[in-house]
């Protein structure tokens, strides 16, 4: 019996690009929308009053627009790091479900539990959801780094809830940091990855 041939480099790159389609798409949209300046940002951001008036698209677009190009580059760079960390852990479906669950969790959390937040922009809350989800997948795979990443993320969330934004984060982002969005995004990440695991377990049992 002969060993199966190793995949060629082009085939490996093609599979990698498939795994990265969702984060690549989000990164590109974020950069393109940032070119729209203040006018587009105000039209797309989470804004409580405008949501009440029926601007439901803001529930999605708020996470793709930023305070400025510097804020965009910061979040897109963080997204690239997560792609590198979770390259073999999160597949394309998981990226999509976790990011969507995190975004919707932020929207619901801000709307129902942080009514003093009038507006919000940025991908950072969704990134916290991805970090939590990826860490849990690593833990499920018995990878020690999963616990380290999980503890670091939980520690950061705890700091923000009791001590406010991490030092220099507002300076780096170029504006106020809505730490509630990070917490709600993390909750969405847990919900998204847990739902996927349950569905896949149920499908395996049914086969």
Image (cartoon, helix red, strand yellow):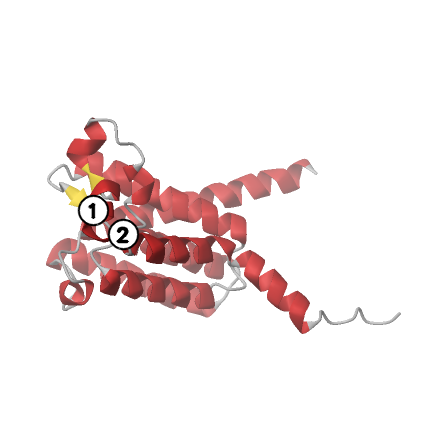
Residue at 61%, 61% (x, y): give it.
Answer: 15
206 or 56, nearer to the observer: 56
Q: Quadrant of the rendered structure where residue 155 is?
A: bottom left
In the rendered structure, the answer to whether residue 197 lies left or right of residue 204 reads left
Reading the image, the residue beneath label 2 is 36
Tell me if residue 148 comes above or below residue 112 in the rendering: below
SS for callout 1: helix
> Where in the figure is residue 11, as x and y percent of width and height?
67, 66
Outermost top residue: 53
Q: Is any atom of residue 150 visible in this view?
A: yes
The alpha-carbon separation of the residues under discs 2 and 1 comes to 7 Å
> Where in the figure is residue 207, as x and y percent of width and height?
70, 38
> Where in the figure is residue 138, as x and y percent of width and height?
48, 61
Residue at 40%, 65% (x, y): give it.
Answer: 80
In the rendered structure, the answer to whether residue 109 lies left or right of residue 203 reads left
140 or 89, nearer to the observer: 89
Residue at 37%, 58% (x, y): give it.
Answer: 131
Q: Are marks 2 and 1 in contact (CB under 8 Å)?
A: yes
Reading the image, the residue beneath label 1 is 39
SS for callout 2: loop
Q: Is any atom of residue 193 visible in this view?
A: no
């Amino acid at each position: 019996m002969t060993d199966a041939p190793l995949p060629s480099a082009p085939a490996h790159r093609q599979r990698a690009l498939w795994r990265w389609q969702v984060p690549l798409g989000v990164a590109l949209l974020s950069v393109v929308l940032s070119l729209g300046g203040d006018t587009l940002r105000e039209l797309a951001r989470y804004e409580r009053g405008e949501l009440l008036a029926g601007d439901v698209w803001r529930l999605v677009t708020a996470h793709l627009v930023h305070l400025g190009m510097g804020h965009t580059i910061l979040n897109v760079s963080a997204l690239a790091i997560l792609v590198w960390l979770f390259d073999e852990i999160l597949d394309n479906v998981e990226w999509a479900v976790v990011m969507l669950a995190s975004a919707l969790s932020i929207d619901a959390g801000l709307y129902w539990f942080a009514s003093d937040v009038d507006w919000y922009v940025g991908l950072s809350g969704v990134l916290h959801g991805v970090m939590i989800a990826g860490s849990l997948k690593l833990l499920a795979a018995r990878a020690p780094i999963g616990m380290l990443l999980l503890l670091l993320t939980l520690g950061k969330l705890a700091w923000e809830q009791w001590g406010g934004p991490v030092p220099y984060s507002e300076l780096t982002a170029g504006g106020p940091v809505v730490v509630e969005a990070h917490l709600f995004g993390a909750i969405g990440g847990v919900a998204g990855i847990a739902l996927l695991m349950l569905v896949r377990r149920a499908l395996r049992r049914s086969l």
